[in-house]
Image (spheres, helix red, strand yellow):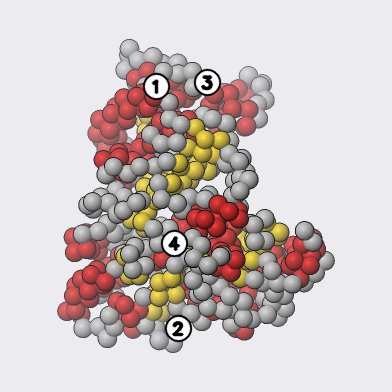
């Protein structure tokens, strides 16, 4: 394809995501091929006990990211980017941005990292009969109310980061349903805010005599494929101060990183999901129906299309494993042996498969920090063994790979008890680089097939670009799932591993040991200050 003419004629789609450490933009064609990219590095700061980003840097990062992408287009194709088929904005899910009627920010932006809302969530969970994690936007709003913060009376609108940027680019106060489900509970049948819980919240705050009701200050909910407005002249200049980008470009509903991650891994179909593995790990499972009761360990959100999703989010995963690998490398270097990091991981990961299915009785905890699924407010790294355990390198490595998914497997037991069926889980993250090892262990831990694609997607910016493309290229009544399967992931490749019965049984034995040993971890937290 002549991509120069393609871009010049305004057929390419732009997706920009505000991640926690990087703002990234990608330009794609209708089949998801990346044509150009740009980015901007940033990080949050702790100000007066609140994890936040300054809004000036939000806009500076937006412009810088777009400028780099625009320059990339110029370098590759010799043209100036002026027109687009569609635009999508994504950002870190949850958060709290309250504004008055003049559009002034009333309180410092709170990101998803803030956990100062326990009083609020304890009340909301009881009132709603629905799990409200501390990072949900409604938890922050209600905590501000309980704390008597004056700014609450003047709120005219509150939203998440992606919805805020979308508002400034399009003038529309809207939000994608997946992102919205992390603000306030949604109804998967009406694809809107849950009306019963709207009424419960209004009753809860009625004694404060505010001039607003909660439905007055929330953004409008939209599902994937719906039009969410158009780039205004002011928005075009906000993106491209040089004035080359035209206005009037259609925009898709703004989505959170969870929804764009599901889109980028083709995990939006019922009975599928994805596991994202890094220093933390989370699993998104697309459900056939909502869970039968409230589980405070499981977050309920939705796909960008509005299907129910159970989210298991764990704070700890690969950090302790990586620390042990650095120790092994240091040991080898002491003897003058130079081994690359990739060689080290490949050798030690593969020897783990030679270990006993139950790790020979060994136990480890990878808790850099607390873990809400196992009810620990803080963490300590531990490795524990009994005198008669089978202590060797293979079992040692297998134990640390097992425990990387320990909290996740604990949450998965809840979904198993709810009769949740998963036909395929897509795994992504650096831990899967050694072929077939972490993938096999994850399959045993969650007792479900795991697929690792040959070529990982470009992440959330690519995911939201796909959502923007879906809006303008979908056929009549075509679902997001069908669009992705037909247009994007036709030749994605990948290796699917079914859980091996021996591994499943071994992991069950390990997880029982892991669960019993949490009492030791709790004592370590209390005694080792």
Task: First in sequence, mark 3 or 2: give its number.
Answer: 2
Q: Earlier in the sequence, mark 1 or mark 3?
A: 3
Report which residue position mark 3 lands on.
Answer: 351
Q: In this view, does 32 lie to the left or right of 170?
A: right
Residue 299 appearing in the image: no
Labels 4 & 2 near each other (Cβ < 8 A): no
The spot of residue 186 in percent (x, y) is 33, 65
Q: Residue at x 25, y 83 (%)?
A: 210
Q: Position of residue 286 (x, y in %)?
A: 39, 51
Give the Cα separation between the discs numbered 1 and 3: 17 Å
Viewport quadrant of the N terminus: bottom right
Residue identified by numbered label 1: 502
Secondary structure beneath disc 1? Answer: helix
Q: Which of 368 and 511 is in front in this view?
A: 511
- Corner quadrant of residue 389: top left
Question: Nearer the viewer's eye, disc 4 or disc 2?
Answer: 4
Is 396 on the left-hand or right-hand side of 378?
Answer: right
Q: Name the residue under label 4.
A: 305
**Residue position for label 2:** 103
């Amino acid at each position: 394809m002549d991509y120069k003419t393609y871009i010049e004629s305004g057929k390419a789609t732009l997706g920009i995501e505000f991640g926690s450490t990087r703002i990234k933009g990608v330009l794609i064609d209708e089949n998801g091929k990346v044509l150009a990219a740009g980015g901007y590095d940033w990080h949050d700061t702790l100000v007066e006990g609140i994890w936040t980003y300054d809004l000036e840097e939000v806009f500076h990062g937006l412009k810088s990211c777009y400028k780099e992408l625009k320059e990339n287009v110029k370098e590759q194709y010799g043209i100036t980017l002026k027109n687009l088929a569609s635009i999508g904005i994504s950002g870190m899910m949850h958060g709290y941005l309250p504004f008055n009627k003049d559009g002034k920010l009333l309180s410092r932006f709170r990101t998803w990292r803030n956990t100062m809302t326990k009083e609020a969530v304890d009340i909301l969970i009881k009132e709603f009969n629905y799990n409200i994690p501390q990072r949900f936007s409604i938890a922050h709003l209600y905590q501000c109310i309980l704390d008597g913060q004056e700014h609450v009376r003047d709120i005219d609108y509150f939203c998440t980061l992606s919805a805020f940027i979308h508002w400034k680019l399009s003038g529309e106060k809207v939000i994608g349903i997946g992102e919205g489900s992390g603000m306030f509970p949604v109804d998967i049948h009406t694809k809107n805010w849950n009306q019963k819980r709207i009424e419960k919240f209004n009753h809860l705050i009625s004694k404060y005599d505010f001039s607003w009701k909660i439905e007055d200050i929330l953004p409008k909910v939209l599902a994937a494929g719906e039009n969410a407005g158009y780039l205004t002249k002011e928005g075009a200049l906000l993106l491209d101060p040089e004035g080359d980008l035209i206005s009037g470009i259609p925009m898709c509903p703004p989505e959170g990183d969870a929804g764009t991650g599901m889109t980028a891994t083709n995990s939006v179909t019922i009975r599928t999901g994805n596991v994202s593995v890094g220093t933390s790990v989370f699993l998104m499972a697309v459900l056939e129906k909502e869970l039968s009761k409230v589980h405070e360990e499981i977050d309920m959100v939705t796909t960008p299309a509005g299907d129910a999703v159970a989210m298991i989010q764990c704070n700890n995963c690969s950090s302790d494993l990586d620390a042990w690998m650095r120790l092994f490398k240091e040991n080898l270097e002491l003897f003058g042996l130079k081994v690359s990091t990739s060689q080290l991981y490949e050798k030690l990961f593969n020897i783990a498969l030679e270990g006993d299915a139950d790790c020979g009785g060994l136990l480890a905890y990878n808790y850099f920090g607390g873990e809400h699924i196992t009810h620990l407010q803080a963490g300590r790294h531990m490795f524990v063994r009994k005198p008669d355990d089978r202590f060797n390198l293979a079992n040692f490595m297998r134990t640390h790979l097992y425990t990387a998914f320990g909290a996740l497997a604990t949450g998965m037991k809840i979904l198993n008890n709810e009769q949740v069926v998963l036909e395929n889980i897509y795994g992504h993250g650096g831990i899967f680089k050694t072929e077939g090892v972490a993938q096999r262990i994850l399959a045993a831990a969650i007792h479900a097939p795991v697929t690792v694609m040959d070529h990982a997607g470009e992440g959330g910016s690519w995911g939201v670009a796909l959502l923007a493309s879906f809006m303008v290229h979908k056929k009549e009544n075509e679902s997001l799932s069908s669009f992705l399967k037909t247009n994007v992931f036709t030749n994605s490749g990948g290796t699917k591993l079914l859980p091996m019965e021996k591994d499943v049984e071994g992991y069950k034995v390990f997880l029982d040991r892991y669960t019993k040993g949490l009492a030791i971890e709790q004592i370590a937290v209390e005694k080792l200050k």
